[in-house]
Amino acid sequence: MATQTQEIRNMRLISHDMLNGFGNIGEGIHLYQDRSGRRVLYLAHESAPKDITGVDVTDIANPKVIVQTDLDYPHLRSNSLSIVGDTMLVAYQSQQPGQPGTGMGVYDISNVEEPRRIGFLDTSGPYSRGCHVLWWVDGPYAHLSTGAADFQPRDQKDDQLYMIVDVSDPSNPKEAGRWWLPGTREGDDAPPVRRNPYFDAGHRLHNANVYPQRPDRAYCAWIDGGTNILDISDVANPTVVSEFNFGPNFPGFTHTALPLFSRDLMVVTQESVRTNGEDHPKLVWMVDIKDETNPVIISTFPTPNLDDYFSRPGRYGAHNIHENQPAPTCSQSDTLIYGTFFNGGIRVYDTSNPFRPEEVAYFVPPIPEGAAANGINDVYVDENGILYVVDRIKGGLYILELTL
């Protein structure tokens, strides 16, 4: 039985869908509009058995699941996806190194109810769990956090590097370049990296975001390795522009780096991965990048009553943010930041004053029937300001709007 009532401020819940009982959604959300104007929200699942769910959200008050596909293996998760035109890329990661089926799938979604695989990049290998997150918003290159057949980490927790993939021929994606934190690969000349003394989560890549405003830059989050900006003007040979890390003075797990180009700022999130506040603080940081060679932290985002959320079941702390994907169905804002906080729901911040971000709205749903906790995992905001918010445990899809 649900153990918590809805908490809401400056938002309105429009609709909620439990996705046919498969409400475990990862970090892959994208809204696709076909030539007839039909709007389908594609969702990647955090764990088996489902792969992709497509929800018709043409009428946002009455979402309808129109397709749900199954993973090829029970050890896989899809977790992440991106769409450009009629093509969708999907990340596949395994539970253990060496398991089959990992890499990046390429799909034709011109028939929205029947995604059709047209290509695959295999990144399996003896030390590889495959692809955790991918980013593709335009152009010929996708940007992956992935293992590889020929990449042997010194520590298995460092198993995912930055790989740039040429997808100009969707039927035959090919690696175009790669970069990893020096010292994490067996055989590196650099010494082994320093492990985080609080919680050693690894020095692998989580996100690498590349935007058309700066196609020669990748904004990367490296779990315990912090954040760096890479020059990818030569995709075969990325180089470091700058790097910084707030760990190990703080617990690590850097998750997402979001540049705000018009303001020379960057928002950086960490991920909470333990319950009851055990790995606190997991924060959202505001970083000044006017001089991109010298990023400077200038503030952290405010937190609610932590004792309250730490006492609730599940995780509390930062996770992902709306990433301003430059798509026609996606909102881009350099002021409003939308963040997901697991049992803390979805929270919205006004960063007009970057030295003092202000929380202006939130939504925390009741714990879903039969679930141990809320796990609000990711958010996508469309061009009309509608929020699509997903739960990684069981809660499925929540569609909301701001009432500011």
Image (tube, grey):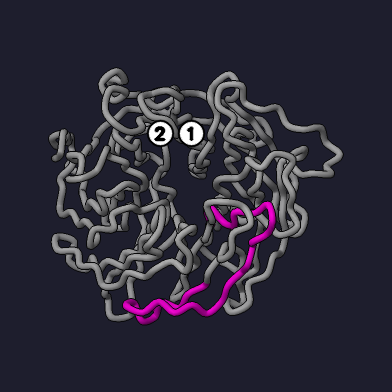
Q: Earlier in the sequence, mark 1 or mark 2?
A: 1
Q: Could you tell me which residue is drawn at 40 percent across and 58 percent down?
A: 48
Q: Nearer the viewer, residue 388 or 98?
A: 98
The residue wearing badge 1 is: 270
- Position of the N terminus by quadrant: top left
What's drawn in magenta, residue-wise? 106-134
Cβ–Cβ below 8 Å for labels 1 and 2? Answer: yes
Is 28 placed above or below 222 here? below
Does 11 sit left or right of 324 as displayed? Answer: left
**Residue 154 appears in the figure:** yes
Q: Nearer the viewer, residue 216 or 84?
A: 84
Q: Label 2: few (<14), some or many (≥20) within 10 Å?
A: many
The tally of labels here is 2
Q: Position of residue 235 (x, y in %)?
A: 72, 59
Is 289 placed above or below 73 here? above
- Magenta stretch: residue 111 in it? yes
The residue wearing badge 2 is: 318
- Magenta stretch: residue 334 in it? no
Q: Could you tell me which residue is drawn at 68 percent across and 52 percent down?
A: 127
